[in-house]
């Protein structure tokens, strides 16, 4: 039997281990769900990501670039004006029948201004303008998709840091418990209560626990790097987060309907269909006549051989060009545009089915996560009771050291699973909100100035001249 001192120390250490384990799992749960003060919130992190995300900012720049397609297209309705000027030196010599020579030197100079206005080009200008407008709408939907992905990445990175921090705390605490367990086992071995096998089993469990703690530390470092990548700042004192369940649809059918109507991936594909359809009409316009009017004003000073002479010519010309045959290139371009239109329609159908599948999967993952948390919570409670029972039985010799170590490892695994499941529920809620096309700074109520792509479009759509962009670049 145990000596009195060893038995007393064993009971006290076991109680301390059990209390520490209970306290740590409570801390891990609080880390994900309980409120705190002076901490970074997930809303604050998402607001930072909304302004920082390089991917989102480059897509905003791409949308602004697409805005310039309208003034480029409307240029087809506007006149083109060109000015030209030339100057030279001319020397003329005239010899009459008597051999008398007469030289004249002139500096011929020609200046002209020409203005050309397209009156009709088969409707290509109007269709090109509409095509540019559809391209802008498509780009805005792509921007909205990029916003969704940036916010989802940021939310995932935020929760990963919380999860891995909690797991590292659990693993570090496990190492401390295993060290105490090893110390107790060594003390018991010295008084002959256990064998050397028990000591080495404790040492092996401690080595495994240290390896797990090292791996948890590495995972946390990776999560912190991802946090910096998507949010633009180092994670410090992160506040727990909850699922955005209040923003989610109440049924799978409603979620699918919302996703089919609002998801930017579908809307972008539909605008791409409009762009492709207008491309067909633009190509077909190349088979129609083109009518242009050209006005010129030319001043010719001192033409060759006429010193001190000046002429002025003003002309207005209307030109009608009727394409008859261009080697078949135009017809090939029309057929190609029609095939691309068919491809765009098929892609729109593909995106509808993709989003339907994505929404169904996201809904299932979120609903499953609720039940998973309940199961792991019950498992943790049961394993806590089981570990306490195994320790009590070990005190009277009914359980071995290996039984205690196994029960402790089982409890640790269930606690890690619970923390992971709590992280998954939050991430899955954002994932489902994204699948319905509703994940945005406005929907989340982020305290950040909302980027409005229409402002830049309104600034440039009517521009006739100028190379400076509205932001001054």
Image (cartoon, rainbow, N blue to C red):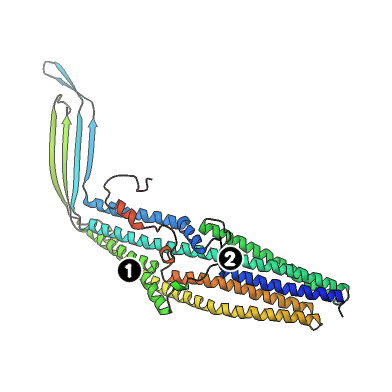
Q: Secondary structure at mark 1?
A: helix
Judge by depth and name the residue closer to the eye, 45 or 119: 45
Judge by depth and name the residue closer to the eye, 79 or 205: 205
Which residue reaches farthest left?
Answer: 97
Do the residues bearing badges 1 and 2 touch, measured as CB atoms within 8 Å? no
Q: Which residues are magenta?
A: 341-346
Residue 329 horizontal/vertical position (percent):
28, 58
**Residue 384 in which image quadrant:** bottom right
Identify the residue under disc 2: 162
Residue 166 is covered by the magenta coloring: no
> Can you say which quadrant of the picture contains the C terminus?
top left
Residue 464 horizontal/vertical position (percent):
26, 47
Q: Secondary structure at mark 2?
A: helix
Identify the residue under disc 1: 342
> Can you say which quadrant of the picture contains the N terminus?
bottom right
Residue 255 visible, this orientation: yes
């Amino acid at each position: 039997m145990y000596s009195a001192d060893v038995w007393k120390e064993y009971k006290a250490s076991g109680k301390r281990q059990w209390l520490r384990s209970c306290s740590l799992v409570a801390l891990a749960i609080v880390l994900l769900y309980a409120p705190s003060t002076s901490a970074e919130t997930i809303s604050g992190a998402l607001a930072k990501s909304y302004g920082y995300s390089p991917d989102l900012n480059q897509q905003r720049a791409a949308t602004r670039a697409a805005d310039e397609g309208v003034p480029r297209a409307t240029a087809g309705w506007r006149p083109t004006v060109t000015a030209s000027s030339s100057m030279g030196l001319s020397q003329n010599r005239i010899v009459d029948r008597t051999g008398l020579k007469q030289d004249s030197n002139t500096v011929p100079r020609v200046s002209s201004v020409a203005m050309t206005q397209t009156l009709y080009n088969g409707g290509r200008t109007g269709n090109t303008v509409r095509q540019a407008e559809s391209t802008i709408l498509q780009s805005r939907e792509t921007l909205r998709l990029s916003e969704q992905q940036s916010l989802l990445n940021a939310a995932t990175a935020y929760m990963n840091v919380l999860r891995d921090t909690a797991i590292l705390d659990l693993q570090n605490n496990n190492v401390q418990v295993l060290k105490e367990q090893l110390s107790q086992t060594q003390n018991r071995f010295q008084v002959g209560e256990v064998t050397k096998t028990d000591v080495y089993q404790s040492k092996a469990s401690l080595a495994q626990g240290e390896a797990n703690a090292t791996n948890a530390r590495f995972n946390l470092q990776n999560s912190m790097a991802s946090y910096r990548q998507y949010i633009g700042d180092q994670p410090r004192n992160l506040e727990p987060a909850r699922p955005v369940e209040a923003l989610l649809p109440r049924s799978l059918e409603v979620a699918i309907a919302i996703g089919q109507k609002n998801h930017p991936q579908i809307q972008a594909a539909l605008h791409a269909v409009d762009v492709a359809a207008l491309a067909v009409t633009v190509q077909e316009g190349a088979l129609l006549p083109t009518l242009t009017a050209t006005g010129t004003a030319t001043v010719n000073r001192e033409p060759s051989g006429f010193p001190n002479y000046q002429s002025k010519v003003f002309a207005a010309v209307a030109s009608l060009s009727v394409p008859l045959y261009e080697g078949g290139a135009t017809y090939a371009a029309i057929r190609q545009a029609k095939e691309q239109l068919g491809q765009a329609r098929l892609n729109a159908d593909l995106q509808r089915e993709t989003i339907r599948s994505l929404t169904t999967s996201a809904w299932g993952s979120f609903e499953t996560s609720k039940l998973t948390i309940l199961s792991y919570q019950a498992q943790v409670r049961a394993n806590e009771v089981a570990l306490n029972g195994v320790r009590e039985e070990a005190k009277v010799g009914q359980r071995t050291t290996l039984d205690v170590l196994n029960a402790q490892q089982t409890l640790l695994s269930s606690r890690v699973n619970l923390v992971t499941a709590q992280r998954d529920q939050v991430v899955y809620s954002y994932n489902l909100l994204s699948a319905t096309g509703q994940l945005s700074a406005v929907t989340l109520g982020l305290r950040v100035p909302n980027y409005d792509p229409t402002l830049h479009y309104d600034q440039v759509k009517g521009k006739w001249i100028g190379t400076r962009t509205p932001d001054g670049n």
